[in-house]
């Protein structure tokens, strides 16, 4: 009976450990999602810097081309038109790449949110199962205590019966 009680106590401790592990896993998922959002912010800032650097480089290139074309006596209007088209094409290209990366990041965030939602659902199911197991353990412990009490009662009755039998044997011998 004592061994059964000890085993049940250890089982209760194990189910508590599983609950703590689930909470740690949930905290890790939240941390991963937070890191993903931070990464999104950093990537956007990098894209803004790259775009600014590219525009400055394009302005420098424009100045160089204007100087060269002046030397070659190409009309300023044609040169400015070409440069404007070139700059516009570069800006459009960069914007498109940025939009593509933002779309990819949004998809990653959406996937992470779905994964996190699934994890939360699994966590609640596990939590419910652990509560059920805990209730079963408590019920089992109560039944074990009842059985233990009955066994002690039967042991007392058995001991009392044994004493009566031994006294009867002693009385029979004396007669």
Image: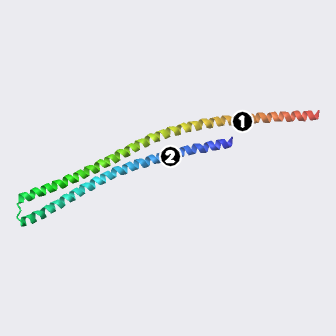
SS type, badge 2? helix
Nearer the observer, 61 or 151: 61
Give the residue at x 15% y 62%.
Answer: 61
Count every numbered label the image shows and give the total.
2
Quarter of the image where one finds residue 156: top right
Colour mode of the rendering:
rainbow
Residue 105, position in %: x, y?
Answer: 32, 49
Q: Residues within 10 Å of mark 2 (few under 14, many from 20)?
A: few
Residue at 46% x, 39% y is 124
Return the x and y of residue 51 as percentages of the image width and height. 22, 56
Query: Crowding at label 1, few (<14), some or many (≥20) Cα neighbours within 10 Å?
Result: few
Q: Which residue does the numbered mark 1 point to in the structure image?
A: 151
Q: Is residue 125 left or right of residue 61?
A: right
Q: Are marks 2 and 1 in contact (CB under 8 Å)?
A: no
Image x and y of residue 134, in percent: 56, 38
Name the residue located 40 percent from the left edge and 47 percent from the top edge: 30
Quadrant where the C terminus sits is top right
Residues at marks 2 and 1, CA–CA distance in whole angstroms = 36 Å
Q: Is residue 38 above or below residue 138?
A: below
- Sooner in the amino-acid sequence: mark 2 or mark 1: 2
Query: In this figure, which residue is indicated by the disc labeled 2?
Result: 20
Q: Residue at x 10, y 66 (%)?
A: 68
Q: Residue furthest bottom?
A: 71
x and y percent of residue 41 in the render?
30, 51
Q: Nearer the viewer, residue 72 or 160?
A: 72
Instruction: Tell whether 126 sits left or right of 67.
Output: right
Q: Quadrant of residue 164?
A: top right
């Amino acid at each position: 009976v004592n061994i059964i009680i000890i085993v049940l106590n250890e089982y209760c401790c194990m189910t508590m450990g599983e609950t703590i592990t689930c909470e740690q896993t949930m905290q890790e998922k939240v941390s991963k999602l937070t890191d993903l959002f931070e990464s999104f912010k950093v990537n956007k800032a990098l894209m803004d810097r790259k775009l600014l650097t590219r525009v400055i480089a394009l302005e420098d290139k424009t100045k160089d081309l204007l100087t060269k074309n002046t030397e070659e006596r190409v009309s300023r209007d044609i040169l400015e038109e070409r440069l404007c088209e070139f700059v516009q094409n570069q800006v459009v290209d960069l914007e498109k790449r940025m939009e593509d990366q933002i779309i990819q990041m949004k998809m990653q965030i959406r996937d992470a949110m779905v994964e996190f939602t699934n994890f939360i659902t699994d966590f609640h199911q596990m939590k419910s199962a652990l509560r059920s197991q805990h209730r079963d353990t408590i019920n089992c412990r109560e039944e074990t205590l009842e059985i233990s009490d009955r066994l002690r009662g039967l042991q007392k009755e058995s001991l009392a019966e044994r004493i009566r039998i031994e006294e009867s044997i002693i009385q029979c011998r004396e007669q």
